[in-house]
Amino acid sequence: MNWIVKAARAVWDFVVGDDPWTAIGVVAALGATALIAGTGAAAWWVMPVAAVVLLALSLRRAAR
Amino acid sequence: MSGQDLALAVSVFLACAVEAVEALTIVLAVGVTRGWRSPLYGVGAATAVLAAIVAALGPALTALPINALRVVVGGLLLIFGLQWLRKAVLRASGLKAMHDEDKAFAAETDAARSAERASTGFDGYSFTIAFKGVLLEGLEVAFIVLTFGASQHNVGLAAAAAAVAVAVVVLAGVVVRRPLSRVPENTLKFIVGVMLTAFGTFWGAEGAGASWPGGDAALLVLVPGTALVALGMVRWLRRTPARTTALGEAA
């Protein structure tokens, strides 16, 4: 069981790294894109805006 | 070769070259200090593990429906790309120490000299260090090859670009027998961060059901746009008085 926890932690560190808020933000942005696209409205702008905002917030946290 | 294929090949080549330079530094340090046989066994074993991972996951990934694949892969690439870009922006703005291959080589060489030597011909220390170094850096390569390749149903092209990058770096390493400190590694990492973020944004949105104005041509705006935003953030951070003088060195 121990190795499963270790492997899961390694995958988490590898993909998510030391800023889980960015990962949470990306998942939320994908969800918002799917919701808006489902209504038939243009949804392409959500991901670029989310990427800029998430990068800025992540940098602000790191620079503090 | 289409524009997307070319972008795929260039992105994978650059990302893999960066990772290969880091792995080469580790292998050179143990090889020069303790002999070549055991570290080369380590490199061979790690390469076999990585090839097995790509061979097992590649066909499985390409069998998934394209939209499900793109939303998952796009999301992962965007998370991964934003990590790279964050580190690159922090380095470029002076808030994080630059990655220095000469320094990494010196630290690895010191550690290799001070480690105990085995009395038998096989050197477990050299094998383990080379195996771990190549496997860890190679996993990032495998991740990029699989995500980029699967999203365009072209794992073969991505794997070929990765192989060429590794071959070029290894050849250069064999010729100079020194860490490749003249490679503009930090600049390459910045470019790779931009590419991963732009492709992650594109595929993530497409997979979630959005349609890009201009279709694939939107990437021609997304890539330079992401680069400009990142450069703007470097300027913003340089002007902002930092409370932290230098964040620690990491991959």
Image: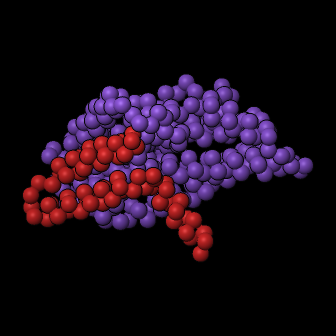
Q: Is residue B233 shown to the viewer in this render?
A: yes
Q: Is residue A39 above or below residue B219?
A: below
Residue that sits furthest to the right in the current view = B119
Quadrant location of the N terminus of chain B in the rendered image: top left
Residue B121 image position (x, y, % from top left): 87, 48
Report the residue at 50% width, 60% height from top.
A11
Q: How many marks?
A: 0
Residue B88 image position (x, y, % from top left): 42, 36
Q: Which chain is purple?
A: B
Q: Is residue B174 above or below residue B148?
A: above
Report the residue at 30% width, 31% height from top.
B236
Horizontally, residue B52 falls left or right of residue B227, namely right
Horizontally, residue A36 falls left or right of residue B74, namely left
Report the residue at 32% width, 28% height from top.
B239
Residue B35, by quadrant, is: top right
Horizontally, residue A40 falls left or right of residue A53, namely left
Q: What kind of colouring is applied to the model shown?
A: by chain
Residue B228 image position (x, y, % from top left): 27, 32
Is residue B26 or residue B113 the one in the foreground?
Answer: B113
Residue A8 image position (x, y, % from top left): 51, 65
Q: Is residue B176 above or below residue A2?
A: above
What colour do you see for chain A? red
Residue that sits furthest to the bottom in the current view = A1
Q: Is residue B70 shown to the viewer in this render?
A: no
Is residue A20 or residue B46 the one in the foreground?
Answer: A20
Residue B20, by quadrant, is: top right
